[in-house]
Image (cartoon, rainbow, N blue to C red):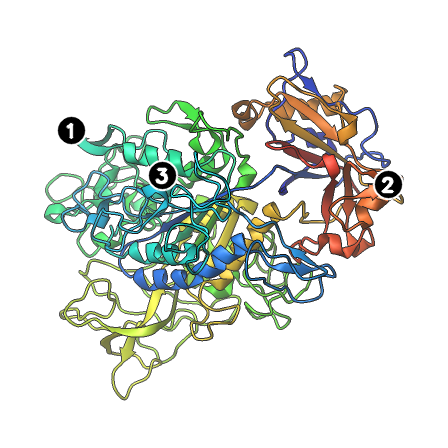
């Protein structure tokens, strides 16, 4: 299978800065393929050039990590996710059948091994090798006294794989693959080392999707097991949710600590967590497509595990943080915006920084509620205690990352962790995806219908087609509302680097009631003392002074079943608070009242909530096309078969993004062919040939001569970190087909393309929207990307290779 990733746009002279792995430059003893002909009949020009990253490689396995928040109030979201598991599993292991015309509705067959009906073909080949694991958001107190194990075992899950039914236990009692903590999809029963492939064996993985059969020797199914694992994650974990750091610890951290000690007043990571290292090695294959799906209803609080950062989680003995300097209130980016406990050199005297005892002034309990320490830290405390988002962007995109000492070391995601097996090909960054089902109104990220309304069923894509669902990366980055906003990101995220809040007031973190209207829907924020109700978060509510703290909600949704919060029940939002009003929109109104009315409510909870997930969204934005956004607040939970039910839109967005990798070389935008239907593009294939480099014309390849422009492109490829890690030593050009061979490539819908009775090896450009090629060839592409680079015969990318495409155009 193949994959295509858009890299970036540049002028032709910049096109030589192709991203890739692997070739050695002349003088190092390696060959690179040579271009002995022009790139295309068009003369390359320096204007409006498109550069694409076309990473073509065989993808026959997926490693899927579910990172599930297990703090209070998450059980309802976990239940909803569990109902979406069949969509997720079926979407990968039994992809839909698409009609060759692209106009008839897709059909689904009963099993991955069943053929599609006549004139239909799979969106992509069923994936028959999948690892699925779950981790939680709980990493303990990071050196503080918060979240001890004695309070709840799941406070300290420490990014270990979870397969439990009891959230208060460290014991994984749900059967997993060879008791390794994760599930393995293996319908062909090929995983056993000593058994016979295709024959059931105790060492095989799961072969049943939704119900048990004789296809394997166990009495379980993939969907059933995964649903149980999702629900077993629980909601008794640490309230300082380290969603992003948990993922980093499991997949990336080269030295996951065993424990944290306080030495002096500084947190010091000690030892190595052998469980994390062992589970990572078993779970993460070097050549797989890696997908992380995060489910959370709160902003990330990944506390730095060094120095005095742990103090932000300290709750013992009434500990309160220090005041910030006065500059922080209006300009958190000011060089003098610091904690009053820090060195004040170079800044004017701030009298508010000195307490009555002569020591640095501290905040009061009302100013520093312990449950609300993870938001807007620089402004509120003069110091950011959390890891920067850049840490996680680098983790998912770069071949080297820093260890504890700050030295660059190989990134496990882009490494071969087990060297004594046959899988030694290193994945490209284009095979790493991060999806966040997080706190953001679904209305903000849904496609808009013809009337300009958010519509998960009939929302229009880039091509004006009523496909519904959530926006993709391109759509999220495009101007909206007649260019009133530069992008959806301006609405839901703002500019964190400049401390600029989102333009949607529902996405602003605040303890105080906010004001304003949603720019897309017009929903107005309702104050606690006003009559009214909006469809996004209902209304603001009164957060009691002196409580442990809370924030106003980004969005809320109806619970399938109400629950009583009597008896001070945990993970319940409608508990009685002594001496404080309960006007929370999550709670059932008093008898005779309505949800629109202000005032007291009962202790019965009828709705669930989510807070702005700003840090998760920031990472998704930074990852560009590798990031996927979904809302943790579903549009509806009543019509179970509808496309907008529960987390089906989020799962659909994830499958749509992955299938562009699994299903072919679909392109996100149009290229410009000449009158011979040729395009001005050069495609290079980089690989580790283990010293056997060859660019055989019989396979549609040619060597790349070191002329100035093409040599510079190859040189740039070799300079990438991933090139060195992968050991690429060979670069060839894959040739664009011409004349009769090109016409056969564009019009022959069969897998085996021939011209004049001979197989065709190479590539062509197919784009039926401009009358170039047969629509059936692109029928499996997403509706916004129905154009592709089609590789035929031996012109397909070789196992483990990475392709780059450089195009010039008008």
Ranked by sequence position, the earlier of labels 1 and 3 is 3
Q: Residues within 10 Å of mark 1 (few under 14, many from 20)?
A: few
| Label 2 element class | loop
**Residue 473, labelled with which disc?**
none
Check disc 1 and report the residue beneath it.
264
Q: Residues within 10 Å of mark 2 (few under 14, many from 20)?
A: few
Check disc 3 and report the residue beneath it.
250
Depicted 511 relative to depicted 245: above or below: below
Tell whether 606 sits left or right of 495. Answer: left
Alpha-carbon span between mark 1 and mark 3: 29 Å
Q: Residue at x 77, y 31 (%)?
A: 700
Q: Is residue 201 visible?
A: yes
Could you say which is closer to the camera, residue 310 or residue 90? Answer: 90
Q: Residue at x 63, y 12 (%)?
A: 28
Image location of residue 193, percent across then percent down: 43, 34
Ranked by sequence position, the earlier of labels 2 and 1 is 1
Could you say which is closer to the camera, residue 538 or residue 743? Answer: 743
Q: Is residue 473 visible?
A: no
Task: Look at discs 2 and 1 and give the one toward the viewer.
Answer: 2
């Amino acid at each position: 299978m193949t994959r295509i990733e858009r890299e970036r746009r540049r002028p032709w002279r910049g096109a030589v800065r192709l991203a890739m792995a692997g070739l050695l430059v002349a003088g190092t003893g390696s060959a690179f393929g040579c271009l002995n002909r022009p790139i295309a009949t068009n003369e390359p020009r320096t204007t409006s050039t498109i550069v694409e990253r076309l990473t073509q490689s065989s993808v026959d396995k997926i490693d899927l990590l579910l990172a599930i928040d297990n703090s209070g109030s998450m059980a309802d979201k976990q239940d909803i996710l569990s109902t979406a598991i069949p969509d997720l599993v079926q979407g990968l292991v039994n992809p839909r059948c698409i009609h060759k015309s692209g106009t008839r509705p897709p059909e689904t067959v009963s099993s991955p091994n069943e053929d599609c009906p006549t004139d239909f073909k799979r969106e992509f080949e069923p994936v028959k090798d999948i690892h699925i694991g779950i981790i939680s958001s709980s990493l303990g107190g990071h050196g503080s006294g918060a979240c001890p194990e004695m309070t709840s075992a799941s406070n300290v899950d420490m990014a270990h794989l979870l397969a439990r039914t009891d959230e208060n236990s460290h014991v994984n009692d749900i059967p997993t693959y060879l008791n390794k903590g994760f599930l393995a999809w293996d319908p062909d029963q090929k995983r056993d080392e000593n058994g016979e492939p295709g024959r059931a064996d105790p060492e095989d993985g799961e072969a049943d999707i939704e119900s048990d059969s004789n296809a394997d020797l166990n009495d379980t199914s993939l969907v059933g097991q995964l649903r149980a694992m999702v629900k077993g994650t629980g909601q008794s974990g640490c309230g300082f949710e380290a969603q992003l750091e948990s993922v980093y610890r499991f997949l990336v951290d080269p030295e996951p600590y065993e424990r944290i000690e306080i030495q002096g007043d500084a947190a010091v990571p000690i030892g190595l967590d052998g469980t994390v290292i062992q589970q990572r090695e078993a779970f993460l294959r070097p050549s797989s497509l890696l997908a992380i799906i995060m489910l959370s209803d709160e902003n990330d609080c990944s506390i730095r595990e060094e120095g005095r950062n742990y103090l932000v989680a300290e709750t013992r003995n009434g500990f309160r943080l220090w005041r910030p300097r006065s500059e922080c209130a209006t300009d958190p980016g000011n060089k003098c915006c610091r904690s009053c406990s820090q060195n004040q050199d170079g800044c004017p005297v701030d009298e508010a920084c000195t307490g009555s005892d002569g020591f640095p002034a501290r905040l009061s309990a009302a100013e520093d509620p312990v449950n609300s320490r993870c938001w807007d830290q620089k402004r509120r405390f003069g110091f950011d205690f959390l890891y920067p988002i850049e840490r996680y962007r680098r983790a998912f995109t770069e071949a080297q990352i820093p260890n504890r000492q700050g030295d660059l070391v190989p990134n496990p995601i882009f490494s071969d962790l087990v060297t004594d097996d046959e899988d030694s090909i290193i994945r490209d960054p284009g095979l790493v995806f991060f999806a966040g089902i997080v706190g953001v109104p679904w209305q903000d990220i849904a496609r808009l219908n013809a009337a300009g309304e958010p519509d998960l069923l009939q929302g229009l894509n880039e091509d004006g087609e009523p496909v519904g669902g959530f926006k993709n990366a391109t759509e999220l980055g495009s101007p909206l509302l007649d260019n009133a906003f530069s992008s959806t990101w301006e609405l839901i995220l703002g500019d964190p680097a400049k401390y600029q809040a989102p333009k949607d007031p529902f996405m602003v973190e605040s303890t105080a009631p906010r004001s304003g209207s949603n720019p897309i829907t017009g929903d107005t924020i309702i104050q606690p003392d006003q009559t009214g109700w909006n469809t996004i978060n209902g209304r603001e509510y009164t957060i009691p002074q002196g409580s442990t703290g809370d924030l106003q909600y980004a969005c809320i949704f109806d619970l399938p079943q109400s629950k009583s919060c009597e008896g001070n029940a945990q993970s319940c939002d409608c508990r009685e608070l002594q001496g404080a009003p309960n006007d929370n929109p999550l709670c059932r109104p008093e008898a005779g009242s309505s949800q629109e009315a202000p005032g007291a409510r009962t202790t019965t909870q009828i709705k669930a909530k989510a807070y702005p997930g700003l840090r998760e969204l920031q990472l998704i934005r930074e990852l560009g096309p590798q990031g996927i956004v979904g809302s943790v607040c579903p549009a509806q939970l009543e019509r179970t078969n509808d496309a907008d039910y529960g987390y089906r839109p989020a799962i659909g967005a994830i499958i749509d993004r992955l299938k562009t990798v699994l299903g072919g070389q679909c392109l996100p935008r149009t290229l410009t062919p000449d009158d011979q239907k040729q395009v001005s593009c050069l495609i290079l294939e980089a690989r580790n040939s283990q010293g056997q480099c060859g660019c055989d014309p019989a396979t549609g390849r040619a060597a790349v001569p070191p002329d100035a422009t093409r040599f510079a492109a190859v040189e740039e490829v070799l300079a990438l970190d991933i090139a060195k890690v992968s050991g690429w030593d060979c670069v060839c050009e894959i040739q664009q087909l011409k004349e009769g061979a090109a016409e056969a490539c564009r019009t022959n819908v069969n897998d085996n393309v021939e011209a004049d009775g001979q197989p065709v090896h190479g590539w062509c450009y197919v784009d039926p929207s401009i009358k170039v090629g047969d629509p059936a060839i692109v029928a499996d592409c997403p509706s916004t990307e129905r154009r592709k680079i089609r590789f035929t015969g031996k012109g397909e990318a070789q196992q483990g290779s990475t392709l780059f495409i450089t195009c010039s155009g008008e």
